[in-house]
Amino acid sequence: MKGIIGAICGDIIGSTREFNPIKTKDFKLYTKKSTFTDDTIMTLAIAKWLCEDKDSKDVLIKNLKYFGNKYPNAGYGGRFAGWLIDDSPEPYGSWANGSAMRVSPCAWVAESLEEANDLAYKSAIVTHDHLEGIKGALATSDAIYLARIGANKDEIREHIEVRYDYDLNRSVDEIRPFYSFDVSCAGSVPESIICFLDAKDFEDTIRNAVSLGGDADTQAAIAGSIAGAYYDIPKNIAYKAIHRLDYDLLNVFIDFEEKL
């Protein structure tokens, strides 16, 4: 299994460690407290936009607001929570990693890297119009798209380093001892990409991301979104995430997958 379920698995697995960080890869993937958070909800809001009208900014905003307000206690940042209830929402200069956590559907519907870039930009700019917020979304989308079309890890690494000037010449083991909670794109997206580059399979990618001890659910969602395009996701991991979606979110997920 491949697709945006990689981001959803990462979010749900990382959900129990967002504010309870660990520095080990030895942990139980799913617990009774594992649940979807804003990462999954916003990913599926983007998926819904793409199913309805990928050229419409209004449809994008409508879906972000609809799903955000339907699940108001999902862990949104303060400024995004304010955006959700604003009658005339405008971008607020965000450089945070929310733009990257939700972008994966763009890379799956795109028919070229250029289209993936364009959709990722549109998905980010309505809230995250800071250069770093846009950059995080574009870099994540590029990595997913390249993984999806069969690029190898060296090709993905080189592309991201050259185009986005991210330092990917580090290992998870080098990063982990000194890393802490960081919601900025600049301080979490490169590390999330490295979690994928430094992994042996999908599960290892997620374990890498959670073990950094940072913004676990979002970093696992970002890393998982890339790994979910590169590796086959084990069915037992995917299905445990799918079964944690409620009826409305599950329907969006199914509808998106059927349209690919």
Image (tube, grey):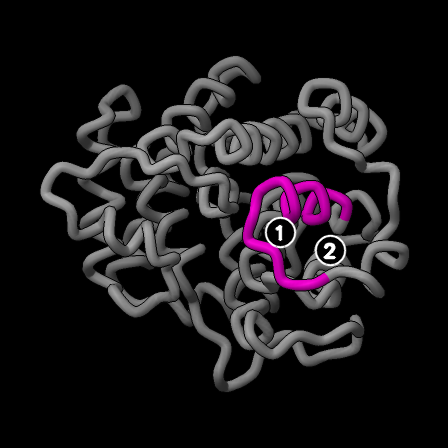
Identity of the residue drawn at 71% across and 54% down: 202
Q: Which residues are magenta?
A: 180-194
Question: Horizontal and vertical percent for residue 151?
Answer: 75, 26
Q: Main secondary structure of the magenta part?
A: helix
Residue 108, disc: none
Identity of the residue drawn at 27% across and 19% down: 55
Name which residue type carries label 1.
Gly
Residue 205, disc: 2
Identity of the residue drawn at 40% across and 30% down: 129
Tell me which corner region of the image, top left, top right, bottom left or bottom right, holds residue 113: top right
Magenta span includes 188:
yes
Pick whichever of labels 2 and 1 is earlier in the sequence.
Answer: 2
Visible residue check, residue 254: no
Q: State yes or no: discs 2 and 1 in contact (Cβ < 8 Å).
A: yes
Residue 96, compared with residue 136, is above or below; it is: below
Say whether residue 29 is left or right of residue 211.
left
Tell me which corner region of the image, top left, top right, bottom left or bottom right, holds residue 235: bottom right
Visible residue check, residue 26: yes
Question: Horizontal and vertical percent for residue 230?
Answer: 69, 40
Question: Horizontal and vertical percent for residue 162?
Answer: 76, 19
Name which residue type carries label 2.
Thr
Between 62 and 110, the one nearer to me in the picture: 62
Check disc 2 and report its element: helix, strand or loop.
Answer: helix
Tell me which corner region of the image, top left, top right, bottom left or bottom right, holds residue 26: bottom right
Identity of the residue drawn at 22% across and 50% down: 84
Magenta span includes 215:
no
Quadrant of the image containing the C terminus: top left
Residue behind mark 1? 224
Say whether residue 209 is left or right of residue 158.
left
